[in-house]
């Protein structure tokens, strides 16, 4: 089982490059990391720096975890 914890300290640009569906989740929730030219924020920080309610943060992280867990052996 893959979890978001293994990607927490990775740059968001690298995460989205490897897992494009994570970029789709962030876009869906109004976090524009896919359009960012820099992309060095860590995954664990990209949600927090947008000052979303804790409940919304949890929804986003749950969706990302679902993506990672559905990858199976990848």
Image (spheres, helix red, strand yellow):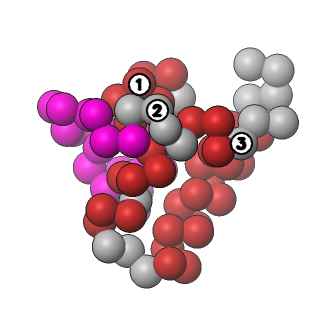
Q: Residues within 10 Å of mark 3 (few under 14, many from 20)?
A: some
Where is residue 14 drawn, in percent x and y? Answer: 41, 25
Gap in Å between the C-alphas at discs 2 and 3?
A: 13 Å
Circle 2 Cα neighbour tier, 10 Å, few/some/many (<14 / 14–19 / ≥20)? some
Q: CA distance from mark 2 to mark 1?
A: 7 Å
- Where the N terminus falls, by quadrant? top right
Image quadrant where residue 16 sits: top left
- Closer to viewer: mark 2 or mark 1: 2
Element type where label 1 sits in the image? helix
Q: Which residue is mark 1?
A: 14
**Residue, x 63% and y 44% (percent of image)?**
4
Residue range highlighted in magenta: 22-42
Query: Looking at the image, is mark 2 or mark 3 earlier in the sequence?
Result: 3
Residue at the disc numbered 3: 3
Q: Is residue 73 left or right of residue 57?
A: right
**Residue 63 found in image quarter:** bottom right
- Residue 27 colored magenta? yes
Residue highlighted by disc 2: 10
Q: Secondary structure at mark 3?
A: loop
């Amino acid at each position: 089982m893959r979890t978001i914890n293994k990607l927490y300290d990775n740059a968001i640009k690298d995460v989205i490059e490897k897992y494009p569906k994570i970029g789709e989740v962030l876009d869906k929730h109004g976090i524009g990391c896919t359009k960012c030219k820099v992309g060095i924020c860590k995954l664990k920080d990209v949600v927090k720096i947008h000052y979303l309610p804790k409940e919304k943060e949890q929804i986003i992280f749950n969706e990302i975890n679902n993506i990672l867990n559905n990858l199976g052996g990848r």
